Image (cartoon, helix red, strand yellow):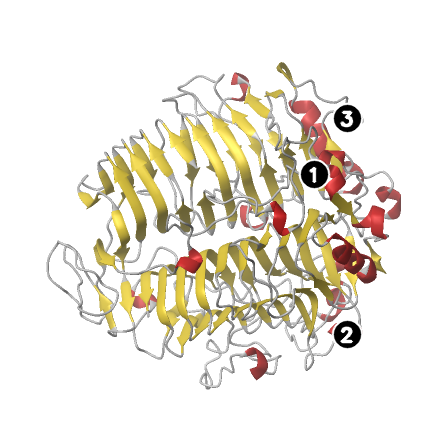
């Protein structure tokens, strides 16, 4: 993000990552493809045969339904004008709504989300908007990346946004608005008065939402705002990724009622104030960023608790005032640049066995991670009741496996392959006979496409549900692109044996090196399949980012394609609902980049079916050593753990979010590891030390076993229920109580684990490490539970 002129951010985003990429499309020659020396005249998506169809849409509706909707098409209420003078909001909204009047509700009148996916495409042009565009769930609004369209706010909009990313047809709170996206768009509010709070986007949605490659043009010095995050329930949503954004004039982001954020790669130029977090009580990390000619960078508050926890790392200041100021009195908390890491808030150091305080003092050590600062003497008391309320420096060294040439953490823009012609893209339905109707076995067709297209073409999987009955192997030299989350759905008896788990999608074999990139896809199971490993990654690239997943998700249960899960999983006893073995495994030989990846075990049904208590065993297992990046990821409601790192090395985590399974806890018929038998091959936790404590027999949010060089920023670990039964929300745990003994665990002495800004809800132990520290909520209380600014091992 390049930020100019007056910019103000009020930010502490709940499970939100905002960042800028320094690296873009991996090398074309890795695939044997040559991108055009001159850009193609037409974006390949626009030129493709548009034969995507939702897999489970009623056949009568499917014949009429259009996934791809070009707003110029006169089918959609006459089409747009695009001259910047005529109002185009009605025509664009008509394209967004097209067909949903017939199929938005299933035949019994209940909401059906996954059967109505849409890409609404806006080509280059100027589009005047005088009525906010409303974006439903399961919808992407995308522009032409070769010539991004400009959406212009008419002054009559007032404070209403150009685009409101919220589906009012579903009376849900913001935290259940899933699967929405904006891409390749320019938002222009310069026609609105400077003293009016004109707004580009209001984005109060949640997981699987994204804003990618968008630009905001606002009047210099105005009250205009690029992105607002405020829903009708007064909340700011949860789980949004903002990437590759440019802001000119006005303000950047305003959010409310949210808890934790990672900002990465920001440049603040000529700002009076860059980030205002003084009205939020969550945690914030600012990484790999810089300022020039800016009065103050971060305006925040000090606290004797974990509130307002702040991490500044690798920050360059050029002719700026204070990097951090105290909003209560304007005093400087941090001047100038930060070469290493500066932390404000409770710090727990497992090497020294202490909890650290530097309220106006310095924590220093001849060994361990603490670096000397200049504000006083050491004050380590081991009780955890004090707090680094005015900041402390921490020494860490990033491994080059995780950084770019400038020493910043590596990031990579989601590849859209806009420099490639449509002739270089292969449609699995048109060319290989895949069907995608949720009934046909598409295994052979998709495997054939991947083999034929490796180092040859980009593999395009149109919208649909593709049943996979045996393992598909992705060879090196593969790029696989979906359409509004095309579904690969595991099916059949090969995936039914938990004692002999099988992989649905295997990315390379052990030791393979090459390219394997995935975007806009979704992995799922077609029923209760306790032997299904949905994705296994063995491949590493010759370059960072050669192997990666963008805007690609996992969904177990909660939709019309769940098969017998709707019947078998409607009680609080999960013995018959071991729905999958493992969502994703990054093996020892892999190196993968994950961005905006959500692994969701459903707690409710998106298509109007019954709520279920599904119990897949495991979320994300990482045993990789060659470089792993997890940027804006989430895994939820799995029985044994959400994240597990076993002997993993060189791992970067930038914003992660979890929820413990609702059905676990006191009173549940299944106390972890039940209903599973721990499998030593996959290093499963046994929970053997829990004794009779039912709040201990609950899934780990993150389990770190050994390993080294692990750098994590902003973890959101939430516990909401003890012994929830489908449809019965009576087991909710008030935030004043304890809902789980420990959220995370650290075992087997990992080396150089730097874990910053851990936010928890109703866990006694924020991190349990066999009492080497007392990283507990009582020692680091925050506004919504526990809030540790740093845990060090």
Q: CA distance from mark 2 to mark 3?
A: 45 Å
Q: CA distance from mark 3 to mark 1?
A: 13 Å
Determine which residue is flagged by label 3. 73
Picture residue at 55% right of the left edge, 72% below the top: 664
Determine which residue is flagged by label 2. 494
Q: Secondary structure at mark 3?
A: loop
Q: Secondary structure at mark 2?
A: helix
Relative placement, left or right, of 756 versus 498 is: left
Badge 1 crowding class, 10 Å Cα cut-off, few under 14, some 14 to 19, many 20 or more, is many
Badge 3 crowding class, 10 Å Cα cut-off, few under 14, some 14 to 19, many 20 or more, is few
Is residue 105 at all visible to an observer of this figure? no
Q: Which percent across, then down, holds residue 514?
A: 61, 58
Nearer to the camera, 767 or 633: 633
Nearer to the camera, 269 or 390: 269
Is residue 653 positioned above or below 331 on the image? below
Relative placement, left or right, of 664 versus 278 is: right
Q: CA distance from mark 2 to mark 1?
A: 34 Å
Is residue 140 at all visible to an observer of this figure? yes
Quadrant of the frame with the N terminus: top left
Q: Earlier in the sequence, mark 2 or mark 1?
A: 1
Q: Are marks 2 and 3 in contact (CB under 8 Å)?
A: no
Quadrant of the frame with the C terminus: bottom left
Report the number of numbered marks. 3
Q: Quadrant of residue 497?
A: bottom right
Is residue 407 positioned above or below 790 on the image? above
Badge 2 crowding class, 10 Å Cα cut-off, few under 14, some 14 to 19, many 20 or more, is some
Nearer to the camera, 725 or 492: 492
Q: Which percent across, then down, holds residue 44?
A: 71, 37
Picture residue at 73% right of the left edge, 24% below the top: 72
The disc placed on residue 119 is: 1
């Amino acid at each position: 993000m390049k930020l100019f002129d007056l910019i103000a951010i009020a930010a502490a985003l709940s499970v939100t990552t905002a960042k800028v990429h320094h690296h873009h499309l991996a090398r074309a020659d890795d695939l044997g493809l040559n991108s055009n020396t001159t850009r193609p005249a037409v974006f390949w998506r626009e030129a493709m045969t548009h034969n995507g169809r939702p897999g489970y849409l009623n056949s009568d509706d499917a014949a009429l339904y259009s996934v791809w909707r070009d707003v110029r098409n006169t089918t959609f209420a006459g089409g747009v004008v695009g001259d910047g003078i005529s109002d185009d909001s009605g025509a664009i909204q008509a394209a967004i709504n097209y067909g949903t009047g017939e199929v938005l509700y299933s035949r019994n009148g209940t909401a059906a989300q996954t059967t109505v996916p849409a890409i609404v495409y806006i080509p280059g042009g100027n589009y005047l908007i005088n009525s906010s565009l409303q974006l439903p769930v399961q919808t992407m609004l995308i522009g032409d990346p070769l010539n991004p369209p400009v959406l212009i706010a008419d002054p009559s909009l007032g404070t209403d946004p150009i685009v409101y990313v919220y589906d009012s047809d579903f009376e849900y709170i913001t935290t259940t608005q899933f699967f929405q996206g904006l891409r390749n768009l320019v938002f222009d509010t310069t026609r609105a008065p400077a003293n009016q709070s004109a707004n580009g986007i209001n984005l109060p949605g949640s997981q699987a939402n994204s804003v990618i490659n968008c630009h905001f043009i606002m009047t210099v010095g105005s009250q205009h705002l690029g992105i607002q995050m405020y829903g009708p329930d007064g909340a700011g949503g949860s789980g949004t990724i903002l990437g590759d954004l440019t802001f000119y004039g006005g303000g950047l982001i305003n959010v409310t009622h949210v808890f934790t954020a990672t900002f990465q790669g920001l440049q603040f130029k000529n700002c009076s104030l860059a980030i205002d977090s003084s009205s939020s009580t969550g945690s914030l990390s600012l990484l790999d960023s810089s300022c020039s000619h800016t009065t103050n960078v971060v305006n925040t508050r000090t606290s004797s608790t974990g509130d307002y926890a702040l991490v500044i790392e690798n920050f360059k200041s050029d002719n700026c005032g204070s990097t951090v100021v105290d909003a209560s009195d304007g005093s400087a908390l941090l001047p100038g640049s930060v070469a290493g890491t500066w932390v404000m808030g409770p710090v727990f150091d497992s090497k020294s066995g202490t909890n650290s305080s530097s309220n106006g003092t310095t924590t220093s050590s001849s060994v361990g991670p603490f670096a000397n600062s200049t504000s006083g003497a050491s004050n380590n008391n081991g009780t955890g009741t004090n707090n680094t309320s005015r900041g402390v420096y921490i020494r860490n060294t990033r491994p080059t496996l995780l950084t770019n040439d400038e020493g910043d953490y590596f990031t990579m823009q989601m590849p859209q392959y806009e420099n490639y012609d449509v002739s270089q893209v292969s449609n699995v339905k048109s060319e290989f006979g895949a069907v995608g109707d949720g009934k046909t076995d598409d295994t052979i067709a998709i495997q054939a496409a991947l083999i034929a297209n490796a180092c040859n073409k980009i593999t395009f999987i149109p919208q649909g549900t593709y049943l996979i009955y045996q393992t598909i192997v992705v060879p090196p030299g593969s790029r696989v692109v979906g359409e509004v989350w095309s579904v690969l759905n595991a099916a059949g008896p090969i995936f039914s044996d938990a004692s002999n788990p099988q992989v649905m999608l295997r990315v390379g074999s052990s030791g393979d090196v090459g390219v394997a990139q995935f975007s806009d896809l979704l992995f799922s199971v077609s029923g209760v399949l306790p032997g299904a490993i949905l994705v296994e990654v063995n491949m590493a690239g010759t370059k960072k980012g050669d192997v990666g997943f963008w805007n690609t998700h996992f969904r177990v249960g909660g939709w019309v394609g769940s098969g017998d899960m709707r019947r078998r999983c409607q009680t609080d006893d999960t013995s018959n609902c071991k729905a999958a073995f493992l969502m994703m495994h990054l093996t020892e030989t892999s190196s993968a980049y994950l961005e905006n990846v959500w692994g969701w075990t459903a707690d409710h049904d998106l298509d109007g079916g019954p709520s279920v208590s599904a119990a897949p065993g495991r979320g994300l297992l990482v045993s990789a050593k060659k470089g792993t990046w997890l940027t804006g990821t989430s895994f939820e409601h799995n029985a044994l753990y959400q994240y597990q790192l076993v002997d993993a090395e060189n791992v970067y985590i930038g914003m992660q979010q979890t929820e413990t399974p609702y059905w676990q806890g006191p009173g549940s018929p299944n106390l972890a590891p039940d209903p599973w038998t721990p499998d030593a091959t996959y290093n499963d936790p046994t929970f053997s030390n829990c004794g009779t404590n039912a709040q201990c027999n609950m899934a780990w949010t993150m389990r770190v076993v050994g390993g080294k060089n692990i750098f994590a920023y902003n973890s959101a670990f939430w516990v909401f229920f003890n012994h929830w039964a489908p449809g019965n929300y009576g087991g909710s745990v008030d935030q004043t109580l304890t809902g789980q003994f420990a959220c995370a665990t650290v075992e087997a002495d990992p080396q150089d684990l730097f874990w910053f800004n851990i936010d928890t809800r109703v866990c006694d132990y924020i991190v349990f490490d066999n009492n080497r520290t007392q990283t507990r909520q009582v020692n680091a209380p925050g506004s919504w539970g526990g809030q540790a600014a740093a845990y060090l091992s």
